[in-house]
Amino acid sequence: EMVKEGFRLSFLLATAKLSRATYYYQLKQLDKPDKDQELKAEIQLIYDEHKGNYGYRQIHLELKNRGFHINHKKVQRLMQVMGLQARIRRQRKYSSYKGEIGKKAENLIQRQFEGSRP
């Protein structure tokens, strides 16, 4: 865009500290179709079906069940690119309350432990 405005390409590349080959390589990459488009759509579908509760592990298993054989790291990478994150469940605070406490048994023996017979 800046080249069209009259700036020289060599000046822009020197300012950005990029090589000429890198510039043209990236320019060519923009024209290529996204090879993971179908996979991204399926990941988004699974994510929406489960209301954002599924992370990359569950989504990977679901994709496996649907016939996609890919690595879990790729699922994780694509989810990161798409900006998808699983909702984190809130942990419950510990409560020592065990309900209503029962009655204490009445002391019938009164600590008289002498045996009358052997």
Image (tube, rainbow, N blue to C red):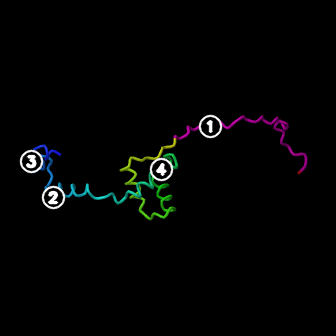
Q: Amino acid at mark 3?
A: Arg
Specify which label sits upstream in the sequence, 3 or 1.
3
Instruction: Report which residue position mark 2 lands on.
Output: 21
Q: Secondary structure at mark 3?
A: loop
Residue 6 coordinates in the image, percent (x, y):
10, 44
Q: Which residues are magenta?
A: 90-117
- Tell me how far mark 1 sits from mark 4, CA to CA: 37 Å
Labels 2 and 1 touching (C-beta < 8 A): no
**As drawn, 24 above or below 102:** below
Labels 3 and 2 touching (C-beta < 8 A): no
Specify which label sits upstream in the sequence, 4 or 2.
2
Give me the disc on residue 104: none
**As drawn, 52 above or below 28:** above
| In the displayed structure image, the side of residue 51 where residue 8 appears, left or right | left
Q: Secondary structure at mark 4?
A: helix
Q: Amino acid at mark 1?
A: Ser
Instruction: Report which residue position mark 4 lands on.
Output: 47
